[in-house]
Image: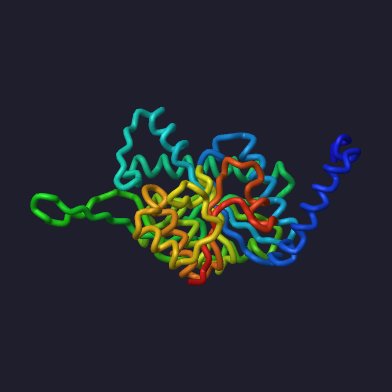
Amino acid sequence: MPKSARSDPTKLAEISKTLAEALPFMRQFSGQTFVIKFGGHAMGDDDLAQSFAEDIVMLRQVGIHPVVVHGGGPQIGEMLARLNIESAFVDGLRVTDRTTVDIVEMVLSGSINKQIVDSIQSAGGTAIGLSGKDGRLIEARQMRRTTRDPDSNIEKILDLGFVGEPVTINTKAIDVLRQSDIIPIIAPIGVGPRGQTYNINADTAAGAIAGALGASKLLMLTDIAGVLDENNEVMPTLSKKQATQLMKDGVITGGMIPKVETCLEAVRGGTSAVHILDGRIKHVLLLEVFTEHGVGTMIRADD
C-alpha cells in the first residue's frame, strides 16, 4: 500500500469498505467457473491488458476457475493488410478462404494467445494456451448465411468459406486444467469432421464453452458500457424475457444484437448469468464481480 494511503484515514476507510464488500462475493463464487471473453480495445492497450491479467490472477487466487476465450479481429486485419490480402465481410463475419484461415490461425493461436499467456504469468498466475483444435475442444461445421434477392424473392446461400460455428464442445482438456491452478486461454479456432480449420466468432465460442461447462458466469468485455436503454443509459440487469423484448422493440440494435443473442444462448445452455462489460475500464472484472452494483449489464437466466 502506498505511504500516502496508509496515512490518510479517508483512503483507509474506502479500502476497508471495498474489502468488506468484496468478501461475501469471494465466498459465494469460490469453486465456481467463470468464462471470460477478452476482446475489444483492451487487447490493444498495454495498461488495460495488464489490468485484465491481474484481474484473472485475482479471480483464481480467491478460488474461482477463470476460462479465457479471446478475439483478435483488428490484429488479423493488420496482418492481412501487411500481406496485401483484402478482407470481405458479410453480416460482420470475415469471409475466410484457405489462405486467410491459415493467417487467422497463426495470429490467434500463435501471437495473441501467447501474449495473453505471458501477461497472466507476469502477473503471478499460471496459464496455458489452447486452440479449439487441441483435444478437439471446439468441433465445428461451416457456417452458412442466406440472403433474399429483393427482386426475385429467391433465397440464396452465401458461402463464407472457412467460417465456422460450434457443434460440440469437448471439455475434457478444460476439466483437467480446472483441477489445478492452471488458467486455460482459448483461441476460437474450430476443427471440422475431416480436420478442417474454422475461424469462429469469439463471442459465439465463449458462449458455447460457457454453456458446455455449466459456468456460473460468462463475462464479455466490449467497447461499450453495457446494454443501453432508449436514453442511452446502461441497464444494470435484464431477464431473458426483457432482453428478447428489447430486441423486438428496436432498443437493442446493430452490433449489440449478436452479443445479446450469444448471451441468451449461454443462459439457455445452463449459464446462470451473463455480463456485458466495458473493457476500457481498468479492473472492470473485479468491479463487476466483487461489488454490489457492478458496472455493466447482467442478463439473468430467469424470466
Q: Position of residue 145 (x, y in %)?
A: 27, 54
Name the foreground residue: 12 vs 197.
12
Q: Position of residue 157 (x, y in %)?
A: 21, 55
Q: Residue furthest right?
A: 7
The N terminus sits in image quarter: top right
Q: What residue sits 46% from the left and 69% below the top?
A: 268
Q: Residue furthest left?
A: 152
Q: Position of residue 289 (x, y in %)?
A: 65, 57
Q: Position of residue 141 (x, y in %)?
A: 35, 59
Q: Along the horizontal axis of the image, is 101 left or right of 149?
A: right
Q: Residue furthest front?
A: 231
Q: Along the horizontal axis of the image, is 231 left or right of 21?
A: left
Q: Is residue 109 above or below residue 270?
A: above
Report which quarter residue 241 is drawn in.
bottom left
Question: What is the count of numbered marks?
Answer: 0
Q: What residue sits 34% from the left and 60% below the top?
A: 248
Q: What residue sits 58% from the left and 53% below the top?
A: 68
Can see residue 136? no
Name the foreground residue: 268 vs 231.
231
Can see residue 16? yes
Report which quarter residue 196 is drawn in.
bottom left
Q: What residue sits 35% from the left and 58% below the top?
A: 249
Q: Is residue 76 above or below residue 18?
A: above
Name the foreground residue: 218 vs 190.
218
Here the colouring is: rainbow
